[in-house]
Image (cartoon, helix red, strand yellow):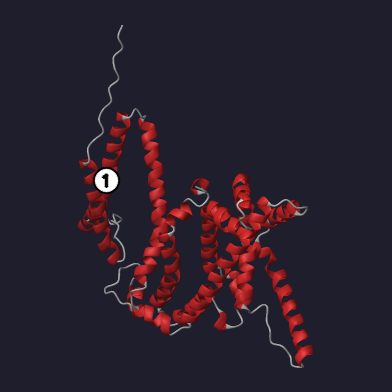
Amino acid sequence: MATKPKTYREPLGKMPRVAIGILIALQIVALLPIIANGGLLLPDFSQGVTARAISDLGAVIGTFLPTVLAIILILTVTIHDGIAHRETTMSVVLRWVLRALLFIWSALVLFPVIWMLYSSLRSPMEFIESPWALPTALDFSNYATAWKESNFANYVFNTVMITGGATVLFFLMLTTTSYILGKYKFKLNKVFNGFYFVAMMIPSILVLVPLYFQLEGVGEFINGIILEVTGKPGSFSMTDNRVVLLIVYAVQALPPSIFLVTGFVRSINNSFLEAAYMDGAGEWYIYQKIILPFIKPIVLFQCLAVFMATWNEYTMAFTFLGLTEEHHTISVGLQHITEIFSRGQEFGVIFAALTISMAPILVLYAIFQKQILNGTDSAEGLK
């Protein structure tokens, strides 16, 4: 007896998806006046069914009606397509519930950023009248005020110098140390691997106070030598030194990265290195032409992570550079800007300073988004 061939329903066309896009756009347009007016009035039926309450209820329904229609249309299209591909209705609904939760989470993350951006274009009076309303005009004077009336240019210079220096030093130490531990056999190899493994487990905040006093003692020792040699008291400081801080940043970021990258180095086939040695290649050539191309994706990811973490770091920057304002980074300088401009309720200037400090990280993420997301994938290794 011949079996009946399975038939599959064709998925719906593009028109429902176009309609969903139109409904979402209408919802965004409907929310803009609400934000501009500082919120939406909820219907009040405490005094009975009044014309005002009915009007407010109609406004709420009309405002969020595009979202309701879009959700109904999305569920209809998804269930229809799921049936066409032999999916159960429950699995389709569950998938869209998870997507809705992710959308809500994304909105909660993005809204503070968007609010900060448009609040940086508002005057103090506008912000006091309604903190959530949109600006009546695009006023970029807050950015000029934040840049000129504070030491912001110096904050940026210090941050770029410390962050860039720490990232370069981290790259050199990470790649060379991982190469040695991954490809060289010597008596202390296991000792160093164990050291970095244990150091990876120690939070950096726990060593902050001991490190501060150790560096302070080293500074006093150096000043003592200067006094004996020159006869004049030295003024060298290890705890108010930008170069020392960038070294500390680079060293503290090493253990987990070395533990990870060393595994990538070990996975390189030794035949590549042996062939290079037979051809007369030196250590620098092997390091530059064989090791680095293979570990490039993971090393780039680690360097980007160190750059972003160092750019936003506050605790160590405040501890080591808090005495001299000329050495402050952006994260420490923002505290001074907040204290100064919050007295006059110039919150737009504060948000403008926050936007300037955040812009480089957003640009960096936009440029290297693929590398960051695929940083731990070794598939892009040696070709």
In the rendered image, the vertical position of residue 359 relative to residue 4, given as above or below: below
Nearest the viewer among 212 and 44 is 212
User: Nearest the camera: 278 or 222?
Assistant: 278
- At a point 39% along the width and 59% down the height, the residue shown is 110
Residue at image point 53% right, 70% down: 164
193 relative position to 157: left or right: right
Q: Is residue 229 visible?
A: yes
Residue that appears at 65% across and 58% down: 177
Q: From the viewer's perspective, is 98 left or right of 228? A: left
Tell me the quarter of the picture where residue 316 sits. Answer: bottom right
Instruction: Tell me where residue 313 appears, x and y as whole percent.
Output: 55, 68
Q: Is residue 234 above or below residue 274?
A: below
In this rendering, the answer to whether 12 lies above or below 215 is above
Q: Amino acid at mark 1?
A: Ala
Please tell me whether mark 1 sits on a helix, a strand or a loop.
Answer: helix
Q: Quadrant of residue 17?
A: top left
Q: Is residue 171 left or right of residue 75?
A: right
Residue 347, percent across and down? Answer: 41, 76
Residue 12's place in the image compared with 383, above or below, is: above
**Residue position marked by numbered label 1 in the rendering:** 70
Where's residue 171, x and y in %? Answer: 58, 62
Bin the neighbour count of mark 1 within 10 Å (Cα to Cα): few under 14, some 14-19, many 20 and up: many
Furthest-top residue in view?
1
Figure disc tally:
1
Task: Name the residue furthest right.
Answer: 228
What residue lies at 71% left-to-right and 53% top-to-bottom? 193
Instruction: List x then y, in percent, for residue 15.
Output: 20, 42
> In front here: 33 or 4?
4
- The quarter of the image holding the N terminus is top left
> Foreground: 369 or 117?
369
- Asked whether residue 63 appears in the rendered view, the answer is no
